[in-house]
Amino acid sequence: MSSTDTAAPLTKDGSADSASVEAGLDALETVQAQRTPVSAVLRQKVLPPVLGVVLVLAVWQIAYSLDLTTPDKLPSPADVWHSLTELWYEGTLFSIIWTSVWRGLSGFALSVVIGTPIGLVVARIKPVRAALGPVLSGLQSLPSVAWVPAAIIWLGITNSAMYAVILLGAVPSIANGLISGIDQVPPIYLRAGQTLGATGLRGARHILLPAALPGYLAGLKQGWAFSWRSLMAAELIAASPDLGLGLGRYLENQREFSNMSGVLLGILLILFVGVAIDLLVFSPLERRVLRSRGLLVHSR
């Protein structure tokens, strides 16, 4: 008999063995998700961005070699690399990066703690939404750098001013993301939750937040972007020895020294941190949420 024969073995009375039938049905219903080969991952995920970086560096080097402008305005990639190695050998590279990363992450975490309940209240209480909804939308569209002078006057050139700018930039985005996610929750979910007794805070925890998670996650992702941009704006303007040396202050220092290599290095480091946080934190969370809801196709 062929090895592909799917007929279930028969018992003495001629009926199919129930255990074999159940096993066959389970095998039919189970979708075998196979791991993507490493070569495919490298080809699909790693190779395109690497080629993009190589292309940018090639165009940059060609523009430098053709003398399209003076070296003090457009240094070569090698000059920027030299500025990076200088920071490395001085032992200040990681301290500069960490100063800004810690401020950005801690400010973002505080923004989540504040923005989430604001979003819940505004989304669920109509009078509050009518009053605060336009304010949140206006605050989200306001450039974060506009808050820096006010924060300095209120709080002085301190870490508190930095965090104030981060909060004013990120909280509206997080709250609006949650509001958008709640608006997309099917009403039947809320009625089912009320029937089961999930009302008030319990309903928010077990019904609203899980159901609104995709929109909420988008708001968190945007909130981090606003946190990082707000922090860089604050560090560019506010200068004090008590604040330490972050990426924004390093960038401004290089501008004051007319060191274009250092300026480009600062820009690249800021870009690198923003992309790294997105790839290491938000992209995996987004894939996990989509996969749990059947919206992400598994590799076969």
Image (spheres, helix red, strand yellow):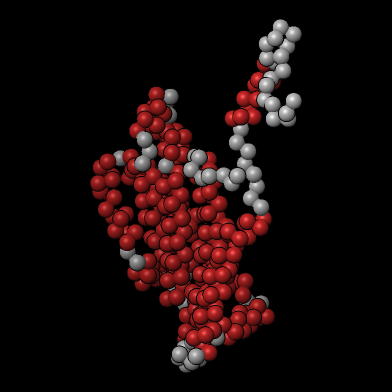
At 30% across and 55% down in the image, what residue appears? 137
Q: Count the numbered circles shown.
A: 0
Q: Is residue 23 above or below residue 57?
A: above
Q: Position of residue 257 (x, y in %)?
A: 50, 88
As rendered, which of 271 and 7 lies closer to the eye? 7
Image x and y of residue 37, in percent: 66, 52
Quadrant (top left/top right/bottom left/bottom right) for the C terminus: top right
Give the farthest residue toward the front.
1
Position of residue 240 measured from the top left corner of the image (x, y, whole percent): 49, 77
Q: Residue at x 69, y 26 (%)?
A: 5
User: Is 268 or 293 nearer to us in this picture?
Assistant: 293
The quadrant of the rendering that contains the N terminus is: top right
**Which residue is at the front of the view, 126 or 7?**
7
Asked whether residue 164 appears in the rendered view, the answer is no
Q: Residue at x 48, y 43 (%)?
A: 295
Q: Can the viewer see residue 210 in this picture?
A: yes
Q: Nearer the viewer, residue 275 or 227?
A: 275
Left or right: where 212 falls relative to 46: left
Residue 190: give x, y in percent of width and height. Answer: 38, 31
The answer to which image quadrant residue 23 occupies is top right
Residue at image coords 25%, 48%:
131
Which residue occupies the extreme top position in the image?
Answer: 13
- Where is residue 43, by image quadrant? bottom right
Query: Relative to 4, is 75 above or below?
Result: below
Q: Is residue 88 above or below residue 121?
A: below
Residue 148, quarter of the rendered image:
bottom left
